[in-house]
């Protein structure tokens, strides 16, 4: 169930059955010459919408802009400051708790968001602990699940990509988006990049990033990505993350 496609009485009816919600969160940042700028938002959104359909879970609109300051050396990348992202996440949680949601499962597509998501959760818990949350707010629990972290996903990545998976513009995330958006994939895909596997290294600011990683990739060869592999990743992710959502909902 997509929140933005519901009428409010439908949300009321849902809340009588469940107080959990999945919130896809990603980024709008370069993903090398053969990856969509929206990759990190598109991946969790594709998965969340499917999980929502199969399991009858409410899915919030995607937070599609994240903390991506290091990508600003490439055209089209957009960042929120960490403090802005923390504020956005807190406002979304506090809006939805007002209606009775109290289990927030953030399905994340971007490593650069993790610190800010966890800081936002700490802000929310601090409001409860300090007594500033208001008496009506339910006891809230938040969880961040990085879609690429499942065991089955790692197995598929290892099988097809091995050392060419990399850590940014990864072969897996590009494959998942090629599965989701085949017509656009046909437009941007290339058979070969040079060097075949991109360099590795640390991440600092945007100018430094562009010097270290000239075409935007880190450690990957995303030309290995295909829609067929993306379909495998999709199925494995939907199954694995669906289970994790259920565990989160019923957990202590
Ligand atoms: Ni990415």
Image (tube, grey):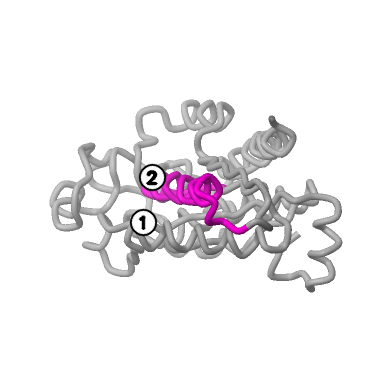
* Residue that appears at 83% across and 67% down: 10
Mark 1 closeness class: few <14, some 14–19, many ≥20 residues within 10 Å: many
Q: Earlier in the sequence, mark 1 or mark 2?
A: 1
Across and down, in percent, residue 2 comes to 71, 63
Considering the numbered disc 2 on the image, is that residue within a helix, a strand or a loop?
Answer: helix
Residue 113 in sight: yes
The quarter of the displayed image where residue 206 is located: bottom left
Q: Nearer the viewer, residue 206 or 222?
A: 206
Label 1 within 8 A of ligand 1 by Cβ: no
Find the magenta span and give its range. Answer: 107-134
Q: Nearer the viewer, mark 1 or mark 2?
A: 2
* Residue that appears at 56% across and 51% down: 44
Across and down, in percent, residue 98 comes to 67, 63
CB of mark 1 within 8 Å of CB of mark 2? yes
Image disc number at residue 115: 2
Considering the numbered disc 1 on the image, is that residue within a helix, a strand or a loop?
Answer: loop
Label 2 within 8 A of ligand 1 by Cβ: no
* Residue that appears at 47% across and 55% down: 26
Image disc number at residue 224: none
Q: Nearer the viewer, residue 240 or 170?
A: 240
Mark 2 closeness class: few <14, some 14–19, many ≥20 residues within 10 Å: few
**Magenta span main SS:** helix
For mark 1, what is the residue? 67
Residue 36 in sight: no
Q: Does the stretch in magenta take in 59?
A: no
- From the image, which quarter does the N terminus lie in? bottom right
Q: Marks 1/2: CA distance?
A: 9 Å
Across and down, in percent, residue 30 comes to 34, 59
């Amino acid at each position: 169930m997509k929140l933005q496609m519901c009428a409010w009485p439908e949300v009321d009816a849902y809340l009588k059955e469940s107080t959990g919600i999945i919130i896809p969160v990603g980024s709008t940042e370069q993903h090398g010459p053969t990856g969509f700028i929206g990759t990190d938002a598109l991946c969790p959104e594709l998965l969340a919408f499917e999980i929502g359909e199969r399991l009858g879970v409410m899915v919030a609109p995607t937070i599609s802009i994240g903390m991506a300051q290091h990508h600003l050396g490439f055209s089209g990348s957009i960042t929120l400051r960490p403090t802005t992202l923390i504020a956005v996440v807190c406002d979304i949680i506090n809006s939805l708790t007002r209606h009775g949601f109290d289990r927030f499962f953030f399905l994340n597509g971007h490593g650069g968001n993790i610190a800010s998501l966890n800081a936002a959760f700490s802000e929310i818990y601090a409001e409860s602990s300090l007594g500033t949350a208001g008496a009506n707010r339910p006891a809230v629990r938040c969880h961040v699940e990085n879609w690429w972290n499942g065991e089955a996903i790692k197995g598929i990545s290892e099988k097809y990509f091995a050392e060419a998976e990399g850590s940014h513009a990864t072969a897996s995330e590009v494959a998942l988006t090629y599965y989701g958006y085949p017509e656009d994939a046909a437009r941007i895909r290339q058979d070969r990049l040079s060097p075949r596997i991109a360099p590795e290294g640390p991440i600092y600011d945007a100018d430094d990033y562009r010097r270290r990683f000239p075409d935007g990739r880190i450690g990957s060869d995303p030309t290995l990505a295909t829609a067929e592999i993306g379909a495998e990743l999709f199925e494995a992710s939907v199954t694995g993350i669906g289970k994790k959502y259920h565990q989160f909902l019923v957990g202590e």
